[in-house]
Image (cartoon, grey):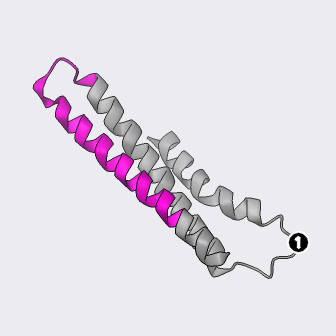
Amino acid sequence: MSTMRFLIILAMLLPLTASAQDVSSDGITPEMILYALIGAFGAASVVVFIGGLIVYLTRLGTERREEGIHIMEWGASILLVVFLCIGILHWLTG
């Protein structure tokens, strides 16, 4: 479980460290904060989807495998919303 927590924290911090290399930046902008939040939600949605896939695969022979499908649907829908938010943010910032 600690590995999963480390990966989530790493996925949240990587966009900020990558943009820290920009020399023309005047500090942390609201756009950077929004991209970091969207990235965190994107990482969380991938984790939720993979968790649903694991639940589905471990319950193949039982009647409760629909729970895994339901979790994967939530992960995929959150990922779709994340991609839409990224597109809207790109469109707004020009």
Q: Residues within 10 Å of mark 1 (few under 14, many from 20)?
A: few
- In this view, 24 is above or below 49: below
Q: Amino acid at mark 1?
A: Val
The residue depicted at 58 percent of the width and 58 percent of the height is 12
| Quadrant for the C terminus in the image | bottom right
Q: Is residue 1 left or right of residue 62?
A: right
Q: Is residue 30 left or right of residue 81?
A: right
- In this view, 61 is above or below 25: above
- In this view, 73 is above or below 29: above
**Number of on-image labels:** 1
The residue depicted at 62 percent of the width and 80 percent of the height is 30
The residue depicted at 49 percent of the width and 54 percent of the height is 42
| Quadrant for the N terminus in the image | top left
The residue depicted at 38 percent of the width and 41 percent of the height is 49
Return the x and y of residue 75 as percentages of the image width and height. 36, 47
Is label 1 in a helix, a strand or a loop? loop
Q: Which residue is mark 1?
A: 23
Residue 19 sits in which quadrant? bottom right
Q: Nearer the viewer, residue 93 or 61?
A: 93
Q: Nearer the viewer, residue 27 or 89?
A: 89
Residue extending furthest toward the right: 23
Residue extending furthest toward the top: 61
Region rendered in magenta: 58-86
Residue 74 is covered by the magenta coloring:
yes
Return the x and y of residue 87 as percentages of the image width and height. 55, 64
Residue 25 is covered by the magenta coloring:
no
Q: Main secondary structure of the magenta part?
A: helix
Q: Is residue 75 left or right of residue 22?
A: left
Return the x and y of residue 40 as percentages of the image width and height. 51, 59
Residue extending furthest toward the left: 63
